[in-house]
Amino acid sequence: MATKRSTWDKIKWTWQPETKREAGDSIVRNFLLHWFPSKVTRQSLSWNYSFWLGTISAVLFLILILTGIPLMFLYVPSVERAYLSVKDLEFTVSYGWFLRGLHRISAHLMVAVVFLHLVRVFLTGAYKNGTAVNQNRPLNWVIGLLLLLLTLLLSFTGYLLPWDQLAYWAITVGTNIASSAPVVGESMRFFLLGGRTIDQNTLIRFYVLHCFFLPLGVLLLFSYHMWRVRKDGGLACVDQLSLEQKKGPVEPIKSKTYSLLGITSGRTVHVETLIVDEDQHTVTASPNLTRRLMAVTLGTVAVAALLTTLFRAPLEEAANPSVTPNPAKAPWYFLWLQELVTDTTFTIGGITINGALIGGIIVPGLLVVAAIAWVYLDKSPPAAVGVWFAKERRKQNIVFLTVVAAILIFTIIGTYLRGPYWNFYWPWQSWPTMPRQF
Amino acid sequence: MFKRDSILLYSFGGAVLLITGFIFWSYYTPEWKDYQTEFQELVAKRFGPDRADRVPDGLQQIWVKELDRVDRCTTCHQGMEWKGLENAPSPFRSHPQDILKKHPLAQYGCTVCHGGQGYATDVESAHGFTPHWDEPLLAKQVSDLYLIKDKKAMMQINCNICHRYDRETAGADYINQGKQLVQTKNCRACHTINGRGGVIGPDLTNVGDKAPEQYDYSRMLGVKTAFAWHVAHIQNPKALVPETVMPNFGFNSKEAQSLALLVMSWQRASIPTSYRPGVQLVEQQTPEEAEREKQMLTGEGAFFVKKGCFACHSVSAFDIKSASDIGPDLSFAVADVQSRFGKTLGDFLAKPTGTMAVVLSTQIQLSDEERREAVDKLKIAYEKKINQQAQAAQEALNKATSQAEKR
């Protein structure tokens, strides 16, 4: 029964399907939703398995694109005008303060949420392959790591754009750490800055990276990330279902689109999975997935917008290369590194060991290498896939949580407990007042 | 399990709507709108509803491209150029008109003289007493901080950014006093200002650009600001910088404030030529001053002028007058050094002690030949002085005897 469907029909869907057929159709025949399965397991929809952190980061990225586009029309990437155009955003552009604030808050949230997503995936062992064929979850973990690095770079490049003291000196600290890499450090910094100092060349480089290349990278990798999630059989917790199922032949499924784990290439409809009782474990994606997705989207928007109205985006004095603010801090998500740099700088017998190499290059480098190698070395059984704190992976989780805790503690020290001259101050100790002109 | 999602969906949707509503509401009710309404009511009351209708509404700004300023102050201060609002309440009172004639609002804006944050459109940020804005409104609030009675005193810093080469600027009393002190105390003996002067102290030509963080406040009490530092330092240099050779001139606090304002006005500013007040871009000298300088540079004591000794010392025998007179008259150095330091002048110049040890090792370095020349010249000066004194004494004696004889 081929009916002619208008474009509008291809985009809209029903929130209250009356039959399973209608429910399936609203996913499969819908342009916006066709990349979802038409049936989803209850586990993968549950709040406290995934906390929907991946979805939230995707929504934040969407907010960032939607607010970033008008900002591109209002911001002038020039050393003379950048600061003024941000002042104008704050004071005269209609809703300019909100656009900028929402963009900033979403960027900060995205860094945090993407990191939490990584923590969740590790603690649930979700980077491990289950029993289904052609899975490659370790690869998706690596893609995810790249996405985290891109997120950090996006945030870092955006940090410079207001061209105020905060921006200028955060980038100074950040790129100085980068320059302490052996052999290539100096030339890396030169390449990054387009010169030896942060100036117009740096600004335009960061701007182009921030507005085009890095978002493009995120989009491409994100698409692949999502495609792999589908190819790997959905969230890892689903793999537990197949372990629990009794073995038995599965009726050939007529249409690929109606199967839950339509995962194998070249096998089309003859899927040899062990899902027996679909009804018991699954629900139709429409409206259960779509509604929850919408709730998560709205919730993310609401929280980000609320935070935007509560915490106005800071804009310090215009960038001044001859006056270093005290303390000069990197963006908060790099403060654990800055703290590490301070703590690993010490003097023995007149020789000063500069911590920038240890804290800025070696430790984060090792962490990235370890994070990649880990997922290929983890030989725990399939029973530990997609389970929070599986007892088979207890030692792994302890090591991982120790590293995470260390990063968090160092970040908190760097953010809240470091004052002028990078001296340590408890929250109840007041910082010395910094001199002013009048 | 999934039924409750609808509740969540609606509550998040409601939250988004509420926040959107708040943002719209705040967009349509900015602070400045109240001031504009009030101003229109004031105009209606004083000049009738017709004039009130013609008052512009919405954000107002003065964009002065040449000075790189965007000032939105007139959004609330709408009566600046109005006649008949001289006694109106703030913020509607009109600006004193005389000064506006020379500095038209459209060409100068507001902040270039008054300070404050021109970009801002709310009261607090506009007046610039917010964190991260280093140019607050230079008015009562700042004057009060330093117990200066004249609430416009601080603003004179900005006057002198353009008027720095004026000998005197009408209305800038503090700056004028400061400039006079620079002349009478001869600050140029040690400091270069506008390209002219000595090298014993730092070049002060652009010292106003120095950031507040760049001063050492460790020996200072009270508020830690660049202005307070200057006042304290001018009043007692050694108290803030123990190793300084700058003398304590015993300035009173008004004098020190004047000088601090002047010093802070010495900023590197790119002022378009058309904005320069109609004077040459050099410090002006009176003809007498120029003549005197020429005399000193060509006369018998030219050596002491060229080497910079006259910054601190007069050599009255050669008619060389030091403006500061920090050190003793060198005419008597030959005898003076012997009695004070117990060595000959030649030995002292070769191995000086005290302040002269600092000066002669850094600022004024003499070769062996120059030292001999100095000693020779000062011996001549001393003889000249002794002869003069002997002559004067003789004359006085003659006068006394003749008077006595007459009696």
Image (spheres, rainbow, N blue to C red):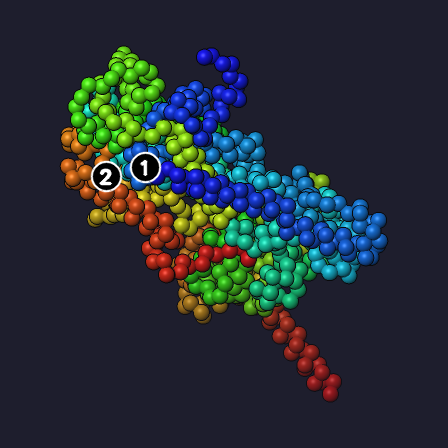
- CA gap, disc 1 to disc 2? 13 Å
Q: Position of A288 compared to B93: left or right?
A: left
Is mark 1 in CB contact (under 8 Å) with mark 2?
A: no
Q: Nearer the viewer, residue A343 or A405?
A: A405
Element under disc 2: loop
Question: Residue at label 2?
Answer: A388
Callout 1: residue from which chain? A
* Percent of width and height locating residue B390: 60, 71
Q: Position of residue B331 (x, y in %)?
A: 55, 63
Q: Position of residue A288 (x, y in %)?
A: 38, 32
Q: Nearer the viewer, mark 1 or mark 2?
A: 1
Image point (35%, 53%), residue name? A417
Give the residue drawn at x 28%, y 22%: A261
Q: Chain of mark 2?
A: A
Task: Please name the residue that numbered disc 1 is placed on.
Answer: A46
Q: Amino acid at mark 2?
A: Trp
Q: Quadrant of the C terminus of chain B?
A: bottom right
